[in-house]
Image (spheres, rainbow, N blue to C red):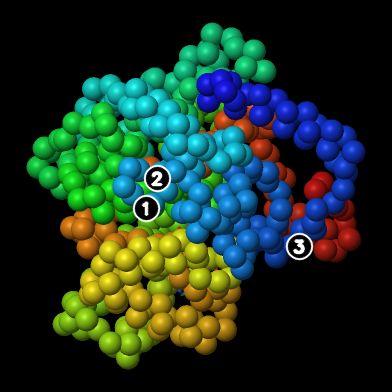
Amino acid sequence: MGSLKERFTSKAEAAGVEIRNLLKEHGSKKIGEVTLSQAYQGMRGITGLVTETSLLDAQEGIRFRGYSIPELQEKLPKAPGGGEPLPEGLFFLMLLNELPADEDVNSITSIWQRRSHVPNHVFATIDALPISAHPMTMFVTGVMALQTESNFAKAYSAGINKKDYWDPIFDDTMDLIGRLPRIAAYIYRRKYRNNEHIQPDGLLDWAGNLAHMMGFQDESFKELMRLYMTIHADHEGGNVSAHTTHLVGSALSDPYLSYAAGMNGLAGPLHGLANQEVVKWIFEMQEQLGTDDPDKTQIADYVQKTLASGKVVPGYGHAVLRKTDPRFTAQMEFGKKHMPDDKLVNTVWKIYETVPPILQSLGKVKNPWPNVDAHSGALLVHYGLIEYEFYTVLFAVSRALGVLASLCWDRALGFPIERPKSVTTDSVKLWLEGKGEIWE
Ligand code: CMX
């Protein structure tokens, strides 16, 4: 069997040989062309990255190492008596490309438990921020303070051989993931619960413990956290948070620095902050309409007002997906099972029936369907987690699983520093006039 680390290194060595051979034989084959519009408009559709942990299909949605979300819900180990997958299992799958057995998942739970200690200076650093600071600001500040613990940074400074980089990167990954629930819960309790903190429960799984330390003891909330932490973990490599973590890591910045950089990207409203924006937008709608149970005509009017004021409808649209996000559907199923009569959850479902035709009618929105963020907040509100500014922190804790598993692969496969070519508009104009190549 071997330890997780031994199993990872033997998989990575084999994959490294396979990739070297593949590149020897096919390295000069073209996988696409780049248009001028793509260079100016967000590099949409350019295939230029390798990310092993998951792959996004525009029609079907995300697959983690080939498995869809419903398949993961069926195949990954669950907590005793639970029905949702344990995120430990997804991490194992992303890291090793293998479905875990129960004992694999239990072993990861205990590794993360053992490595969950957060030094006091991290809490002191968070405490130095005003209570009004956004939870994501506190979160990345906490992660940055934790960087003092990086094994990789110390090993690099001591002169580690480049073929061994992956080893302390792997250790940092396990340490950091183990510590994140503590940091997230600390921020929640500091900002919203009078600074009254709850110690971890050594018998709980990673997501269950996060719920517990935040103060949510309801078993179905713990189930929600297991599902939430699983479905938000990864969305292939090109999204802002994954790409940033990978890019910064390519400079051999350690996992703390790389992950914090990625999470600064997640904190943008067009990316992970959209989950808070959705609930804020619905609360504002309720206030303006004077009802917590708006009908579809009222919702349609409110959507038109949002668009007329030059804002996006949060939770809708995607740069790659072209159908309803299966992460939205998984949360909808959870809602139907656990809270079918919840008014806010029902409003989210009415919005789902109302928004797509309106966005479609604009003629420019490429994907009028809901993404993951359209649903997540309403489920949290149901359990009393109404402080929507905190939601992106939960997304960030989950996203660590995917981006850090990928970072382990990046270093194990020896990927070089990332450095695409950029051009200036003057150089483009000269090229269009036939006066030189665009890359000169
Ligand atoms: N509401 C209103 N307009 C929208 C829209 C929405 N939900 N989604 C896209 N559009 C608009 C764009 O703003 C753009 O308008 P302009 O040409 O006037 O600039 C036009 O439609 C074309 O955009 P697109 O090609 O369909 O979408 P992009 O790939 O550029 O952007 C995304 C994708 C997600 C940023 C965009 O759909 C959006 O802003 N959605 C709302 C925010 C959101 O939910 N983000 C979370 C995404 C998931 C995640 O990362 O967590």
Q: What kind of element bears circle 3? A: loop
Toward the viewer: 51 or 121? 51
Q: Where is residue 416 in the image (x, y as percent from the top left)?
A: 69, 31
Toward the viewer: 113 or 267? 113
Mark 1 residue CB less than 8 A from any atom of ligand 1 = no
Q: Do the residues labelled 3 and 1 touch (CB within 8 Å)?
A: no
Which quadrant: the N terminus? top right
Q: Which mark is residue 83?
A: 1
Q: Position of residue 81 (x, y in %)?
A: 31, 47
Q: In this view, does 382 lie to the left or right of 226?
A: left
Which residue does the image show at 46% across and 61% down from the upper left? Answer: 327
Q: Are marks 2 and 3 in contact (CB under 8 Å)?
A: no
Residue under numbered circle 2 = 78
Which residue does the image show at 71% across and 49% down from the upper left? Answer: 48
How packed mark 3 is, by other alpha carbons closer than 10 Å (few <14, some 14-19, many 20 or more), is few
Mark 2 and mark 3: span between their CA atoms?
A: 46 Å
Q: Which of marks 3 and 1 is in front?
A: 1
The amino acid type of the residue labelled 1 equals Gly
Which residue does the image show at 19% across and 78% down from the upper left? Answer: 292
Q: Nearer the viewer, mark 2 or mark 3?
A: 2
Toward the viewer: 275 or 293? 293
The amino acid type of the residue labelled 3 equals Thr
